[in-house]
Image (cartoon, grey):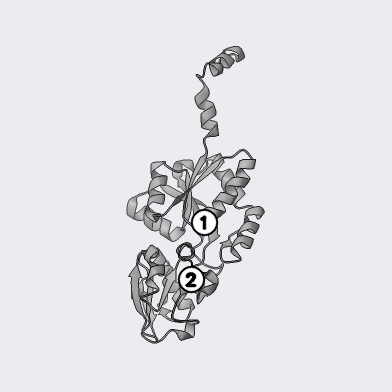
Amino acid sequence: MLNSALLAALIAAGLFSFAAGAEAAALKLGVSAGPYGEILDYTAKIAAKEGLEAKVIEFTDWNMLNASLQAGDIDANNFQHQPYLDNQIKQRGYDIVSVAKSIVVPMGLYAKKAQKLEDLKDGASVSIPNDPTNAARALFLLAKAGLIGLKDGANLNTTIADIASNPKKIKFVELDAAQLPRSLDDVDASVITLNYAVLAGLSPKGALLLEDDQSKWNLVWVVRKDRQDDPSIKRFIEIYRSPEVRDFITTRFNGTIIPTW
């Protein structure tokens, strides 16, 4: 081992400066643009007071978040629910894993031409996400609204083919999630995730129907498998799941984003 005098000399010469730099390196946390990022920014301010630095990086392309995590460009991400993550791992072979629940960001049914569910006419067109996991989520919400019925055994992989009843003869338009708010000018209603709704200026309180805290599509914290026990990441998530952050979410978003703790 190096004696204290030699260690001090090496540090003074800059030969051990890399160690200090490693300790000071900020966590890089990926998140989709919008409310999710605002919550992480608030958490990062609390973490900084404990000496835990974190840089929140917002992505506009969902596909890049897991790719960046897999590549090691970010240390963790918080933007997706478990069904979406499972599908990504299956399709792309990512070596990533969820380590904690975060929030429920309710999906909502929005319309410009209707003020309430009963205003949707027979043959109405409804746009829904075209990715498998969010499509299933949209169909469950429409079933909750009483607009459709799903087959027995419907699950997180449900598709339009699993619709058992469609009394209003709704016509489905499947689109990329980011395009759904713009589709409101062309369809009678649309099922939109909150982050895209907020970015488009839609008020969650203006939705015909929102998911509640019983949603199976709560968001999760995701890391690479080789980092799932990383103490810095675990500590940041502990701060995120604190009463202080929960109170911030409840107050700032007035119940439209629901903590899971």
Label 2 CA crowd tier, 10 Å (few <14, some 14–19, many 20+): many
Q: Position of residue 182 (x, y in %)?
A: 39, 69
* Mark 2 to mark 1 CA distance (whole Å): 16 Å
Label 1 CA crowd tier, 10 Å (few <14, some 14–19, many 20+): many
**Going from the N terminus, do you reach mark 2 or mark 1 first?**
1
Horizontal side of 57 relative to 238 (left or right) equals left
Quarter occupied by residue 87:
bottom left
Q: Amino acid under label 2?
A: Gly
At mark 2, the secondary structure is: strand
Foreground residue among 167 and 189: 189
The answer to whether residue 161 is above or below residue 228 is below
Q: Position of residue 104 (x, y in %)?
A: 53, 62
Q: Which residue is mark 1?
A: 36
Residue at image location 56% in from the left, 50% down from the top: 41
Horizontal side of 105 relative to 122 (left or right) equals right
Q: Looking at the figure, which quarter contains the C terminus?
A: bottom right
Q: Are marks 2 and 1 in contact (CB under 8 Å)?
A: no
Residue at image location 52% in from the left, 56% down from the top: 36
The answer to whether residue 63 is above or below residue 9 is below
Q: Position of residue 51 (x, y in %)?
A: 62, 38
Q: Position of residue 91 (x, y in %)?
A: 33, 55
Horizontal side of 68 relative to 104 (left or right) equals left
The circle on residue 108 is 2
Q: Amino acid under label 1?
A: Tyr
Number of marks in picture: 2
